[in-house]
Image (cartoon, helix red, strand yellow):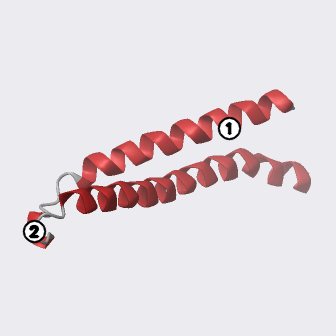
Amino acid sequence: MIAEFGHQALISILSHLFFIALAWWALQSINYEKLLRGNHVLQARVLFIFLSIVIGSAVSNFFLDYLLWSQQLPLLFQMIM
């Protein structure tokens, strides 16, 4: 039982890191130079990091919830029978 929690934690960490990196990669396609005020590059990078974390975490949570629900779905049919 405890080992299962360890596996779930590892999958959650890897999922979050993967989707945050994917969000960072996708945000690189935005031409944000037009939106910047002069000499605020560091602030724009921090904003992109925060956006990557928010988007990546939301997508990862959706993925992990979907995975959990798909694992719990067979339990519905066991209760009926």
* 13 left or right, relative to 41: right
Q: How many marks can you see? A: 2
Gap between marks 2 and 1, in whole Å?
42 Å
Residue at 32% over, 57% down: 46
Residue placed most toward the observer, 57 or 42: 42
Residue at 62% over, 47% down: 67
Residue placed most toward the observer, 36 or 76: 36
* 72 left or right, relative to 43: right
Mark nearer the viewer, 2 or 1: 2
* 57 left or right, relative to 40: right
Residue at 20% over, 51% down: 28
What SS does tag 2 mark?
loop
Local packing at callout 2 (Cα closer than 10 Å; few below 14, some 14-19, many 20+) is few
Q: Position of residue 33 (x, y in %)?
A: 10, 63
Q: Position of residue 27 (x, y in %)?
A: 25, 55
Q: Disc 2 designates what residue?
A: 38
Q: Is residue 5 positioned above or below 41 on the image?
A: above
* 43 left or right, relative to 52: left
Q: Which mark is residue 17?
A: none
The amino acid marked with disc number 2 is: Gly
Q: Is residue 55 positioned above or below 37 on the image?
A: above
Q: Which mark is residue 9?
A: 1
Q: Is residue 20 positioned above or below 10 on the image?
A: below
Mark positioned earlier in the residue sequence (2 or 1)? 1
The amino acid marked with disc number 1 is: Ala
Residue at 13% over, 63% down: 39
